[in-house]
Image: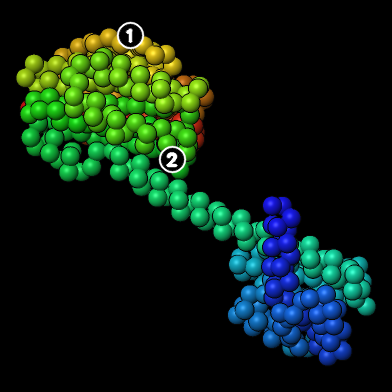
Amino acid sequence: MIDQDFQEIEKRIYKSKILVVDDSPLNRELIKSYLTSVGFHNIAFAENGRQALDIIFGDSPDFVILDIIMPEVDGFEVLEKVRKDRRFDNLPIFVQTALNQEERLKVFNCGATGLLMKPINQAELLSSLKAHLQTGVLIKDLKSYSQRVSKDLDLAKSMQIDLLPNAHTLDFIEKKMGILIHSEFVTSDELGGDLWGVEPISDSLLSVYVLDFSGHGIMAALNTFRLSSFLKQVLQTTKSPSACLEKINKYLFDNLPTGQFATMFLGIVDLEEGKISYASASAPPPFIVNHETLEVLSGNGEGFPLGIVENGGYEDREMAFNTGSRLFLYSDGMSESCDHKGNMFDDEGIQNFLESNISEKRFFESVMRDFRVRKGNAGTEDDLTVVSLKRNA
């Protein structure tokens, strides 16, 4: 396989486009004979710098052999104009020269890749030519591969966004159930391992969850795809949050690779009873924000992470959820973020964010703005998911 790849690169090298720039017909013919004798035939010629620029900008050669002393436009000007165009950053330009040391230094300062001393030695020319053409082929392959990967990642990211609740679902929940939902979903890489969702179960029951797979990037994202369809089935057929987590835990235990796991909050909003029944698998604690009493109450996020042991033993818990209250959920990408001094916010810090913004009319936006300001320029080391459910009726 390696030999085949090398042979393919060799074939592509000999198809490369070479530009020879020299005002001397004799020198052009000499260089041509050197190149054609070993199999290079895609050769263009320029008699001066002006012609050379026209060919370079119009035909994008793979290698340029450039004379310096020429009429109209000399080699120095050719180098300067070509190197100003970022498209030709990787274009190898070898200058043929008999210049003194100071002038050679100027050649490199203008952007020459290397020198070919006059009179040109065939072995030296071919050695430099093949080495840089091979590099050029590999660079093109890497760029092509990078573009394909980038396109695939963009598609996968779009698919992952499609797993989240869409505007139609959120609008239905607001109008039919009186619950206004805000959210923020940010991945640390192109893809992430967080997932959140809401699923109406009946006219008065609504499930809500925030899930966070260990790690981030492609592997974590694959886990979210793997679980999403199973998750909807479980939420529609199982009324107890703890029973749901048991089924999800068993599914992940059977399907996740060793060493991978997930944390999860799963709640069921009961509008008739004015409460939230929930269970947690080592997720950050849920908060109930009461905008009338100006209180922020913390729930319990304890529970065994999903996918590590076959039986997690999850527990149902309850919190009041009356009109005017808000459920605030987040992944540890928020609580484990740090301020500009390197201090982690932790769950207590998130509660402080909520308390300090509780009187703001645009509460969710204010909390997230406060979070970003205190976080400063520190990068996002983990995926970030934040969800707010405000009960208006």
Looking at the picture, tell me which residue is in the foreground, 223 or 297: 223
- Identify the residue position indicated by label 2 in the image: 191
Residue type at tag 2: Leu
Q: Residue at x 35, y 16 (%)?
A: 281
Q: Is residue 129 above or below residue 145?
A: below
Q: Where is residue 123 in the image (x, y as percent from the top left)?
A: 90, 70
- Residue, x 51% and y 25% (percent of image)? 341
Quadrant of the rendered image containing residue 45? bottom right
How did the renderer colour the structure? rainbow
Tell me the residue that label 1 is attached to. 313
- The kind of residue on which mark 1 rests is Gly
Describe residue 107's horizontal placement relative to residue 276 as left or right. Answer: right
Q: How far apart are marks 1 and 2 (CA)?
A: 31 Å
103 up-or-down from 315: above or below = below
Mark 1 crowd level (few <14, some 14–19, many ≥20, 10 Å Cα): some
Q: Is residue 45 left or right of residue 38?
A: left
User: Does label 1 or label 2 sit earlier along the sequence?
Assistant: 2
Q: Nearer the viewer, mark 1 or mark 2?
A: 1
Q: What element carries label 2?
A: loop
Depth check: 306 or 275 in front? 306
